[in-house]
Amino acid sequence: MTERMLTVGILGATGAVGQRFVALLANHPWFRIGAVMASERSVGKVYGDAVQWHLPAVPGAAVREMCVTPCTPDGREGLDFVFSGLPAEEAVEIEPLFAARGIPVVSNTRSHRMDPRVPLVIPEVNAGHLAIIPDPSRTGDRQGFIVTNPNCATSALALALDPIHRRLGVRKVMVVTAQAVSGAGFPGLSVMSILDNAIPYISGEEPKLETEPCKIFGCIHHDQIMVSDMVISAACTRVAVRDGHLMHVSVELNQLASRDEIIACWDDYISDIHGLGLPSQPERSVEYLDVPDRPQPLLDRDRGQGMTVTVGRLRECAVLQWKFAVLGHNTIRGAAGGAILLAELLTVRGWFPRS
Ligand code: NAP
């Protein structure tokens, strides 16, 4: 049977994350863009005029000439699902409107991430949490639902922790981040605020980094996600880097382990999507680099087309047990790329049927 392309909408298509969606979906083998939606500022303009494009590859003519429409589910029967790159304040109301009309939402925003009835998923780490969404083969109907992917820093942190957590159990985590300016959206911080500077505060970021991994490493109980008892302390800093969040992580494990055993966790990692061959799945989701001065944002953020999280500098920690550095591309692995991989998983698991 021929498999059809799925038609997707993008909520917040003109923003930093929205532009990544447009770029990453340009030649996607399963998904094609059917609607670009944004604020009143952009509605009625063609996408090419509404967007202040800032990525290397320019969008194709079909998307450039598409009219930007409002973020409402009215008249969206042709969409199979939507990706959301909306600000949280807007997403909290807009995303449920789509879900209520039977249009699933794959969201990047924090609004529904910690709702125990909404899966918060990194496909490699906790694909099993999708089981709390109503099973399409059981209901037979087109179901609206919201699934979320984590905050950009959480995506990299949880992927770096997962291989160790599976084998050795991670009990406590301390993390200090150096986060890129693109994490603040577009146009983001003014040059005067960030050039030659580092800002030891990112509004709302530390609570996300301290709670989201606990939900990701949690378990299902009565169709809800129960958070794990992992304890995390986070300190978040904005630095003058364009893309790529770097972080220093210290961990206490449930078991004693040698340096070689911990590196083997990353080298031998078999994730929840091992062997599925999803189009956005990198060859290595996590890669340990045994080089003293890596990972670096400039050199390592594009590893695996921005989908590989790079780990390095594993050494003993005098306070907890081990410490290491982690780097992830915030708008690819930590946002649009992660959401597209999640939608691909939903497709192969039957929630977005292609036949
Ligand atoms: P952004 O650059 O500020 O883009 C926001 C988008 O939402 C724009 O398309 C904007 O449209 C639209 N929008 C704003 N107000 C709206 C309204 N009232 N109604 C409808 N649309 C509206 O933000 P971003 O960095 O892309 O982030 C988007 C979401 O992803 C946020 O929730 C953020 O926390 C999350 N996130 C961001 C990153 C990152 O690295 N940047 C990573 C992970 C998650 P106009 O252009 O028309 O104003």
Image (cartoon, rainbow, N blue to C red):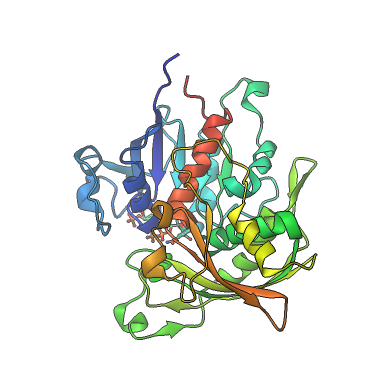
> Is 250 situated above or below 159?
below
> Is 98 situated above or below 297?
above
Residue 90: image x %, image y %?
Answer: 47, 54
> Is 4 situated above or below 283?
above
Residue closest to the eye, 301 or 34: 301
Residue ranking furthest to the front? 260
**Left of 73 or right of it: where is 123?**
right
Residue in the picture at 37% in, 77% down: 240
Write down the quadrant of residue 55 in the picture. bottom left
Looking at the rendering, the quadrant in which ligand 1 lies is bottom left
> Is 238 situated above or below 336?
below
Residue 275: image x %, image y %?
Answer: 56, 37
Residue 158: image x %, image y %?
Answer: 61, 59
Residue in the picture at 30% in, 79% down: 191
Write down the quadrant of residue 236 in the picture. bottom right
Residue closest to the eye, 249 or 263: 263
Regarding residue 231, the answer to whether it shows in the image is yes
Residue ranking furthest to the bottom? 196
Regarding residue 98, the answer to whether it shows in the image is no
Residue 108: image x %, image y %?
Answer: 50, 52
Q: Quadrant of the N terminus?
A: top left
